[in-house]
Image: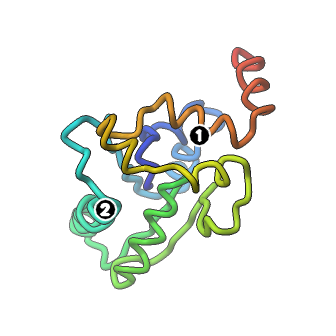
Amino acid sequence: MIYSVINRRYILDLLPEASVVRNLLYQGLDIFATDWGTPSAYDRTLTIGHFVNRHIDRSVDTIRRITNSEKVSLLGYCWGGDLALMYSALHPEKVKNLVTIATPGDFDLDDSLLCLRTRSINEDHILDTFGNMPGMLLNCAFNLKRPIEYGHKYFHFFE
């Protein structure tokens, strides 16, 4: 399971009765999940290529060795699905199946407020200023994508 670099490994395992991980384990699958940790100043030079060709490739090789499998199946969630797509395109000899959930895929097709707004952002200026993309800025950006849903989510949080 490959998650977005901003998600934690338990995002698909929050509630026992609605756990994707538990369901897959119940079906007899071995599950391995990424946990990217919390970004720090040391991570400011990492690129997408670093995650795809270093972290994911090493993880896939480790899983192949542990399971004695020639190929592995990848499940990518959200932006982790894009990382899985990239990895699968670059390393098809190691990937048996690819499943993505809530994956943007083709960013040119998205004309939501978030995508329209972020296309004009100077990411180099943000990275020069903060070192990494601040979580608060990411949250604000995601809230632009569905502002009504944002209010609904917190209104019903404790249900």
Could you say where residue 151 lies in the image, as x and y percent from the top left? 76, 24
Where is residue 122 drawn, in percent x and y? 46, 50
Specify the label residue 56 is tagged with.
2
Extreme residue in the left direction: 42
Considering depth in this image, is 1 or 144 the residue closer to the camera? Answer: 144
Q: Quadrant of the C terminus?
A: top right
| Secondary structure at numbered mark 1 | loop
- The percent position of residue 137, horizontal first and vertical second, equals 51, 33
Residue at coordinates 77% horizontally, 17% vertically from top-left?
Answer: 155
Res 142 → quadrant? top right
The residue beneath circle 1 is: 19
Q: Nearer the viewer, residue 155 or 97?
A: 155
Query: Helix, strand or loop at disc 2?
Result: helix
Q: Is residue 140 above or below residue 77?
A: above
Left/right of residue 140 with respect to residue 7 in the rendered view: right
- Looking at the picture, does residue 118 appear above or below residue 131? below
Amino acid type at image mark 2: Ile
Q: Which mark is residue 102?
A: none
Mark 2 packing: few (<14 Cα in 10 Å), some, or many (20+)? some
Amino acid type, residue under disc 1 in the picture: Ser
Q: Is residue 54 left or right of residue 36?
A: left
Q: Residue at x 59, y 40 (%)?
A: 19
Mark in front: 1 vs 2: 2
As displayed, is residue 119 above or below residue 127? below
Q: Quadrant of the N terminus?
A: bottom left
Who's the residue at 51% across and 71% down the image?
Answer: 98
Which quarter of the figure has residue 111? Answer: bottom right
Q: Residues within 10 Å of mark 1 (few under 14, many from 20)?
A: some
Residue placed most toward the observer, 131 or 21: 131
Q: Are marks 1 and 2 in contact (CB under 8 Å)?
A: no
